[in-house]
Amino acid sequence: MAVTKIYIVYYSLHGHVETMAREVLRGANAVPDVEATLWQIPETLHEKILEKVKAAPRPDDVPEIRGEQLAEADGFMFGFPSRFGVMASQFMTFFDNTNDLWTSQALAGKPAGIFWSTGFHGGGQELAALTAVTKLAHHGMIFVPLGYTFGKGMYEMGEVKGGSPYGSGTYAADGSREPTELEIQQANYHGKYFAGIAKKLKKRSPA
């Protein structure tokens, strides 16, 4: 069977989204005949600003991706922190630089999922995902939501948990909070669930 290539593309300023992305990667690669790889988008902030906000070091084992490289994959998982309730400007800039792919509709029909990190409840646990869907729609990509397929973990009320039917998520609070075990489990499941859908879609797509 042909391998389904999934690109997990993320931006992480303080490491929360990176943690989620690595777990999404593990979940996706647990699906047979799926090859998932991790990519980070370019940083747009000046080095002095990054020092001031105490940004986490960018990992050496994750290459930067150029927009045109998206055409190589069969499906995508996009991860980002929110800013004022929507995706961070770094990710918006990345999508702004995919004009050639939009013009040719090279990504049309390919599945895409979303995961994120927000500061607090009002930071975009749903809005960040909903507004990100516009980017997918203009490219003709097929948005694959998580739904309530994660089971009882979706209904957890005994602890703070990020995520929604639109995808997996975490809370960063003031930056000191790390993804919980339940959020990690959800991210892993999300990667596995999405990979299964992407594999089915590739199998059914015309050669």
Image (cartoon, grey):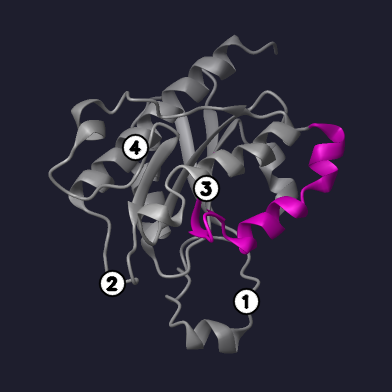
Q: Amino acid at mark 3?
A: Ala
Q: Is residue 9 magenta?
A: no
**Mark toward the start of the polypeptide (1 vs 4):** 4
Residue picked out by circle 3: 128
What are the residue bounds of the magenta stretch?
77-105
Viewer-nearest residue: 82 or 15: 82
Gap between marks 4 and 3 measured at Cα: 23 Å
Q: Amino acid at mark 4?
A: Gly
Residue picked out by circle 4: 27
Vertical placement of residue 195 versus 183, above or below: above
**Mark toward the start of the polypeptide (4 vs 2):** 4
Residue picked out by circle 1: 45
* Label 1 crowd bin: few (<14), some (14–19), many (20+), radius 10 Å: few
Depth check, mark 3 against mark 1: the one in front is 3
Q: Write down the quadrant of residue 30 in the picture.
A: top left
Tell me which residue sits at (33%, 25%) in the image: 148
Mark 3 touches mark 1? (CB < 8 Å): no
Left or right: 58 in relation to 99: left
Gap between marks 1 and 4 measured at Cα: 31 Å
* Label 3 crowd bin: few (<14), some (14–19), many (20+), radius 10 Å: many
> Which quarter of the rendered picture does the C terminus lie within?
top right
Residue picked out by circle 2: 176
Instruction: Point out residue 192 in the picture as x, y percentages from the top left corner.
Output: 36, 31
Instruction: Point out residue 44 in the picture as x, y percentages from the top left corner.
Output: 65, 71
